[in-house]
């Protein structure tokens, strides 16, 4: 498998664009429309796709350098397409937002490089490397919520509310944040970053695995 076949969803292939007049998303490839509320589900689906690509790529037990390249490619793709989705389409992703997203991405690449060096030194197993790689991919959810926050502010929204999502045990910081109800934008962190509330700072116990959402009004 080479990098090109892996990257089935290059960032230029984010087809969803926000239609401000109709207040819904339009898929420019299929013409389908979808409400804003459906987008967090699409975020989950895109992350799950990236997991599948990761599993497929790592099944061949490639060299550490190849593992790095594969994860890096998936990660940068995912950060870009999710950031584009959050702001209403790739065209709306301006230089400032891109810089912000690239900074977040760079942090994950730092973690990735650390994991690769530990893997090279045989201090972590292939299974542990895969577990960590999945966490880095999950962190891309924060790219979506970072630009979504900006999208909502530009639409004149002023309040936000944490929506705790958990299959089994949703952790208490996330449940506490949900109990806060509507708060001014800027009070809450972004799902996928690990930060739940900014002041005082609380962290999701699942760190980047948090699948919580935010509503705006
Ligand atoms: Zn959570």
Image (cartoon, rainbow, N blue to C red):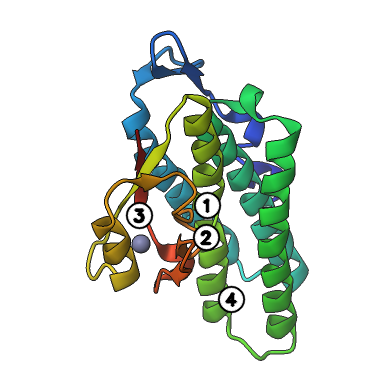
Q: Residue at x 68, y 55 (%)?
A: 105
Q: Where's residue 197, x and y in %?
A: 43, 61
Taking depth in this image into account, of 45 and 63 the one nearest to the observer is 45
- Cα gap from disc 3 to disc 1, whole angstroms: 11 Å
Residue corresponding to mark 4: 129
Q: Where's residue 177, x and y in %?
A: 32, 60
Sequence order check, earlier mark of 2 and 3: 2
Marker disc for residue 212: 3
- Cα gap from disc 2 to disc 3, whole angstroms: 11 Å
- Cα gap from disc 4 to disc 2, whole angstroms: 20 Å
- Can see residue 3? no
Q: Secondary structure at mark 1?
A: helix
25 is higher (above) or lower (below) than 183: above
- Can see residue 75? yes
Sequence order check, earlier mark of 1 and 2: 1
Residue corresponding to mark 2: 193
- Cα gap from disc 1 to disc 2, whole angstroms: 5 Å
Mark 3 vs mark 4: in front? 3
100 is higher (above) or lower (below) than 131: above
Q: Are marks 1 and 2 in contact (CB under 8 Å)?
A: yes
112 is higher (above) or lower (below) than 93: below
Q: Where's residue 85, x and y in %?
A: 52, 33
Would you identify the image quadrant in which residue 64 lies?
A: bottom right
Q: Quadrant of ligand 1?
A: bottom left
- Cα gap from disc 3 to disc 4, whole angstroms: 25 Å
Q: Is mark 3 within 8 Å of ligand 1?
A: yes
Q: In the shown orientation, is residue 59 left or right of residue 73?
A: left
Sequence order check, earlier mark of 1 and 4: 4
Circle 4 Cα neighbour tier, 10 Å, few/some/many (<14 / 14–19 / ≥20): some
Taking depth in this image into account, of 74 and 60 the one nearest to the observer is 74
Q: Secondary structure at mark 2?
A: loop
Q: Residue at x 58, y 33 (%)?
A: 84
């Amino acid at each position: 498998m080479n990098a090109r076949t892996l990257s089935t969803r290059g960032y230029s292939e984010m087809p969803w664009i926000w239609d401000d007049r109709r207040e819904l998303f339009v898929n420019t490839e299929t013409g389908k429309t979808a409400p804003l509320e459906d987008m967090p589900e699409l975020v989950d689906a895109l992350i799950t796709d990236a997991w599948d690509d990761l599993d497929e790529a790592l099944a061949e037990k490639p060299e550490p350098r190849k593992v790095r390249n594969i994860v890096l490619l998936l990660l940068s793709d995912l950060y870009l397409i999710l950031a584009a989705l959050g702001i209403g389409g790739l065209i709306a992703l301006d230089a400032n937002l891109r810089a912000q997203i690239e900074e977040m991405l760079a942090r994950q690449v730092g973690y990735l490089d650390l994991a690769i060096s530990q893997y090279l030194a045989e201090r972590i197993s292939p299974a542990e490397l895969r577990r960590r790689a999945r966490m880095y991919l999950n962190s891309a959810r924060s790219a979506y919520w970072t630009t979504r926050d900006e999208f909502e502010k530009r639409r004149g929204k002023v309040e936000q509310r944490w929506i705790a999502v958990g299959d089994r045990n949703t952790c208490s910081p996330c449940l506490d944040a949900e109990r806060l109800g509507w708060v001014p934008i800027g009070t809450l962190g972004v799902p996928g970053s690990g930060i739940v509330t900014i002041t005082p700072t609380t962290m999701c116990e699942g760190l980047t695995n948090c699948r919580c959402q935010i509503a705006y009004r």
